[in-house]
């Protein structure tokens, strides 16, 4: 990978927003960075990271690889030159609708070509992108539109999205709705068949003064008015997150934040070849992990971005077999599903070279099985919406430590702070993970107190507990809010889950704390058993006797056919906790 560099800029900008610089903590001696002795030669920690507008990523790729395929969607392709031209027309169209510096524009889209074209078109027009989950209920979307003060919303004519989007005119100050045709994004024959046989999935859309067809948005010569962007201060993206306090709020990611993280991750891939990689987008772009690690990093490589509108195991496997992607970022549950899919051994998955796992802990057995199946390298990483999102990842070449989320990315400082007095701790000591770097957000949208609570002295307090070992590798112990307090003893669900995953019959496990009369709180494990295998409570209890301390061993077990997951496929503790709280409430009132 020939990373973009700029001799004028480095990882230590002289000025910028809180959290944008990885300088050492004020009034402290600069810590020794143990990760430097293991840093890969192809990704220098002090590499230059210029602060640039996000649309420069696409501009540079268009200039280098105009004839290469940029986007692929269910058989239809767009070159970089074609994509760049569409983005300029989209930018001019957005400006005609009133988008200017700081105008918030929502993207309520599944993975389709409309997403990247609108994403860069909005940025080029000077607007701020607001990522929105198409699976959210109308009430949740209403809250986001009101909170972020969205003026314009982009969606498609699917029954999944358009009816919810159109109701927002009645309850919010939304001015315009830009609507693309799902069928029109497909190859002609496929689009015709989709309209013929999938009519129930599409809703009719009538153009009006408030509803703008996508074709109308692009009906111009593609000459948007230039907009002066200050990459360090202008917000490119509002990314909603539960953050460190559990209350949904929007992280303000500047242009510099987003471009920095794309370049950090691209350099980290190491073995990639410019202009020849293919990135599989099975994760949705509205999630910041896929947005950065698939879409933006894909552009940094001049790669082909293969889009799936949603993850379905059979479609995903066929896509890998036929279209030969080389890079496949995903969450652990997707790798697990592929490992256990009967079709996986009948198809050729060996085109995959690099897979970055994020969003949740990666069980060692899942990693090993997927690598054996595909011949790829699977590395676990760590990040948050507030960090654009990647903070650490294991190197794709070199020492790859099991159970670790790897080394801090170039220009990134990870500190471990004491939970009680915020002291910076030493090697091996457990505390709160804090991050400094060019990818750290400007703050939370319209939430100065929440911003002040997590951005202190330029360091982002993540709410995660972890430690750094003598080699500079970062280990996550658990979320502070997920810690279980049993008789004053801190128990980390992740430790219990890792032990349970060692049993060959376990496919998935999730551990939460539940009320306990004697200890105050105790662990409860929810387990999904692998198909064709059996596991009983006495068997798992016996298995854990030598693998966990007595206080760490779950007090309760529950076996389920399905465990609740988030919208992008991560195992979710939220639903399990809500169920247990409801049970507790029912018991008290019975």
Image (cartoon, helix red, strand yellow):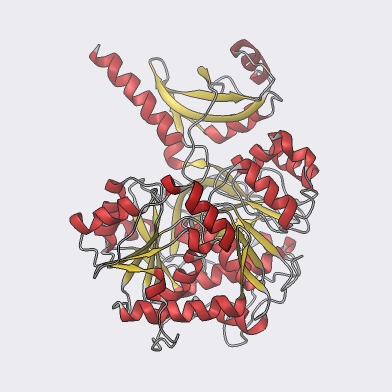
* 545 lies left or right of 562: right
Q: Quadrant of the C terminus?
A: top left
Quadrant location, the N terminus:
bottom right
Q: Nearer the viewer, residue 5 or 315?
A: 315
Q: Residue at x 57, y 29 (%)?
A: 509
Where residue 152 appears, x then y in whole percent?
Answer: 30, 67
Q: Which image quadrant is residue 32 in? A: bottom right
Residue located 24% across and 70% down the image: 209
Specify whether 107 is left or right of 260: left
Q: Is residue 56 visible?
A: no
- Relative image position of residue 453 (x, y in whole percent): 34, 56
Q: Is residue 245 left or right of residue 30?
A: left
Q: Position of residue 225 (x, y in %)?
A: 38, 88
In this view, the residue in front, 327 or 383, is 327
Residue drawn at 67 percent across, 59 percent down: 34
Closer-to-camera residue (386/170): 170
Q: In this orientation, does residue 534 appear?
A: yes
Q: Quadrant of residue 109?
A: bottom left
Quadrant in the rendering for residue 230: bottom left
**In the displayed structure image, the side of residue 500 where residue 239 appears, left or right:** left
Q: Position of residue 588 (x, y in %)?
A: 26, 15
**Number of numbered tags placed on the structure image:** 0
> Compared with residue 542, is residue 75 higher up or lower down, i.e. above or below?
below
| Image height of 170 relative to 564, above or below | below
Q: Residue at x 73, y 53 (%)?
A: 322
């Amino acid at each position: 990978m020939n990373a973009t560099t700029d001799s004028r800029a480095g990882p230590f900008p002289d000025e910028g927003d809180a959290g944008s610089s990885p300088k050492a903590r004020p009034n402290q001696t600069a810590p020794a960075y143990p990760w430097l002795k293991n840093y890969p030669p192809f990704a220098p920690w002090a590499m230059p990271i210029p602060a640039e507008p996000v649309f420069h990523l696409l501009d540079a790729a268009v200039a280098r690889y105009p004839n290469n395929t940029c986007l692929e969607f269910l058989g239809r392709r767009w070159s970089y030159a074609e994509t760049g031209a569409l983005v300029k027309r989209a930018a001019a169209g957005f400006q005609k609708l009133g988008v200017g510096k700081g105008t918030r524009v929502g993207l309520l889209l599944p993975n389709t070509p409309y997403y990247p074209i609108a994403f860069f078109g909005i940025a080029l027009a000077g607007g701020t992108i607001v990522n929105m989950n198409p699976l959210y209920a109308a009430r949740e979307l209403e809250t986001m539109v009101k909170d972020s003060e969205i003026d314009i919303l982009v969606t498609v004519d699917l029954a999944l999205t358009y009816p919810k989007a159109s109701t927002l005119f009645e309850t919010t100050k939304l001015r315009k709705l830009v609507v693309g045709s799902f069928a029109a994004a497909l190859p002609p024959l496929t689009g015709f068949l989709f309209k013929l046989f999938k009519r129930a999935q599409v809703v009719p859309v009538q153009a009006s003064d408030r509803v703008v067809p996508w074709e109308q948005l692009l009906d111009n010569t593609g000459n948007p008015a230039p907009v002066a962007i200050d990459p360090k201060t202008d917000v490119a993206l509002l990314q909603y997150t539960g953050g460190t306090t559990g209350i949904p709020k929007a992280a303000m990611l500047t242009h510099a934040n987003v471009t920095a993280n794309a370049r950090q991750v691209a350099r980290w891939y190491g073995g990639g070849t410019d202009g020849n990689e293919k990135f599989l987008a099975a994760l949705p772009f509205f999630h910041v992990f896929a947005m950065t690690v698939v879409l933006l990093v894909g552009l940094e490589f001049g790669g082909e971005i293969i889009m799936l509108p949603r993850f379905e195991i059979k479609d995903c496997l066929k896509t890998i077999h036929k279209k030969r992607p080389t890079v496949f970022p995903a969450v652990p549950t997707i790798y697990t599903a592929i490992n256990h899919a009967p079709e996986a051994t009948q198809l050729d998955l060996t085109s995959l070279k690099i897979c970055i796992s994020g969003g949740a802990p990666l069980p060692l057995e899942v990693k090993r099985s997927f690598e054996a199946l595909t011949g790829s390298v699977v590395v676990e990483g760590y990040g948050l919406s507030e960090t654009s999102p990647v903070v650490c990842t294991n190197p794709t070449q070199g020492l790859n430590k099991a159970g670790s989320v790897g080394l801090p990315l170039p220009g990134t400082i990870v500190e471990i702070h004491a939970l009680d007095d915020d002291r910076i701790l030493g090697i091996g000591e457990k505390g709160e993970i804090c991050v400094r770097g060019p990818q750290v957000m400007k703050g939370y949208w319209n939430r100065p107190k929440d911003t002040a609570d997590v951005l202190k002295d330029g360091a982002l307090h993540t709410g995660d507990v972890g430690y750094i070992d003598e080699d500079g590798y970062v280990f996550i112990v658990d979320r502070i809010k997920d810690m279980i307090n049993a008789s004053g003893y801190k128990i980390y669900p992740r430790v219990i889950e890792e032990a349970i995953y060692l049993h060959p019959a376990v496919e998935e496990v999730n551990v939460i704390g539940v009320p306990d009369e004697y200890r105050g709180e105790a662990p409860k494990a929810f387990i999904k058993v692998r198909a064709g295998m059996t596991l009983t409570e006495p068997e798992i209890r016996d298995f854990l006797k030598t693998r966990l301390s007595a206080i760490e061993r779950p007090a309760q077990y529950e076996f389920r056919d399905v465990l609740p997951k988030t919208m992008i496929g991560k195992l979710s503790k939220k639903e399990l906790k809500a169920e247990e709280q409801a049970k507790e409430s029912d018991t008290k009132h019975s």
